[in-house]
Amino acid sequence: MIIVMKSKADQQEIDNVIQWVESAGYKAHVSKGVERTIIGAVGDERGKVVLKAVEMMPGVEKIMPILAPYKLASRETKEGNTVIKVGEVEIGGPKFVVIAGPCAVETEDQLMESAFVVKKGGASMLRGGAFKPRTSPYSFQGLGEEGLKILAHAREKTGLPVVTEVMRASDIELIERYADVLQVGARNIQNFALLKAVGHAKKPVLLKRGMMTTLEELLMSAEYILASGNDQVILCERGIRTFETSMRNTLDISAVPVLKDKTHLPVIVDPSHAIGQWKYVLPLAKAAVAVGADGLMIEVHPDPQHALSDGPQSLKPEKFYTLMDEITSIAKIVRKEQAQEHGAH
Ligand code: PEP
Ligand code: MN
């Protein structure tokens, strides 16, 4: 249920409604818009009858059911865009954000070199996997904690916050000690135990769409994290499986405007894992900016030919610099227009 407060409702009236909602056994999610406050009452629908009485309370304009099954992720519950702060970086705000780095942390030298390259190119965050979800058990599985230490060292040297993947709940505590953002990969999108566990974490979560998940399923997975108490979720479109075999996956560019319409959460695009070949990463990255994504995730490697994972889709430093130049000019136009349209803050 959504409780829309009158534009003139005062703080006392808002507090009274929140108290009522909570005493009826719901969680109250308060969203303060420019015009008015909206209170989302989320929980077991059986309390509905009790909740209806809220309509009579002073300061309440109207109550409405939340139609989307993903209650907390829905734009119905929150007017403005969610902006996630990671250190100085803001994802979902007016500025376009680029997260870049190698697929995996391989060695101290490889990661440090990558980190300085992406920083020089203008990226806002560094990525790199220490725990790698590989299709083959014989492929490089990542350096584990040693990789996390290298990432933390790179952050110290470059000032770039670090994004890295968490594959199982028992690693969260360890990863949180080193990383700034926890990535849940495409293969774990419906690992509900992991989603609940990162929902209890203190760090933001970057949630990647599965190869075979619908947008509603993606949003329901985000809902697991939000409902567990972590309201910092970044969604990432990274390509889905289709009948097309000439590329690794098919980038669902249409997911961006649809998600932006349905949810207040930030949406970024990973063209590297979608297309699987470095030479197509640039045009897809440009498309992602143009279509209104809040950011990009790009794989960059100083020596892709010798990369231990995802070399074919990784950009060499020079290519990354070109990409940054080209997307920056598009972002300048697109983001300005959007800020005017939606009053983004
Ligand atoms: C990754 O970002 O390193 C990764 C494995 O991506 P995905 O989960 O999208 O395949
Ligand atoms: Mn990869």
Image (tube, helix red, strand yellow):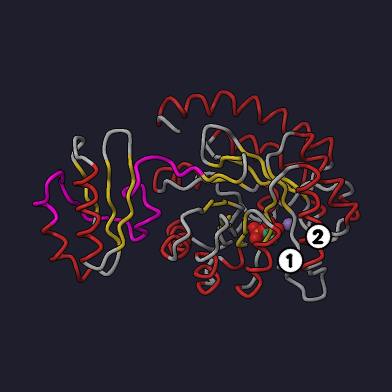
- Residue under label 1, please give it: 132
Does 21 sit above or below residue 13?
A: below
* Residue 194 position within the rendered picture, expressed as x and y whole percent measured from the top left: 55, 71
Q: Please state the extent of the stretch shown in magenta in the rendering.
A: 54-83
Measuring 23% from the left and 58% from the top, which residue is drawn there?
19
Quadrant position of residue 282: top right
* Residue 343 position within the rendered picture, expressed as x and y whole percent measured from the top left: 40, 29
Quadrant position of residue 342: top left
Image check: 84 left or right of 160? left
Measuring 68% from the left and 36% from the top, which residue is drawn there?
283
Pick the residue in front: 248 or 150: 150
Does 251 sit above or below residue 47?
A: above
For disc 1, does the CB lie below 8 Å from ligand 1? yes
For disc 2, does the CB lie below 8 Å from ligand 2? yes
Q: Amino acid at mark 2?
A: Ser
Q: Quadrant of the N terminus?
A: bottom left
Instruction: Give neighbour class at mark 1: few <14, some 14-19, many 20+ (Cα, 10 Å).
Output: many
Does 106 sit above or below residue 320?
A: below
Query: Which label belongs to residue 268?
Result: none
* Residue 28 position within the rendered picture, expressed as x and y whole percent measured from the top left: 30, 57
- Residue under label 2, please give it: 309
Q: Quadrant of the C terminus?
A: top left
Q: Amino acid at mark 1?
A: Lys
First of labels 1, 2 by sequence position = 1
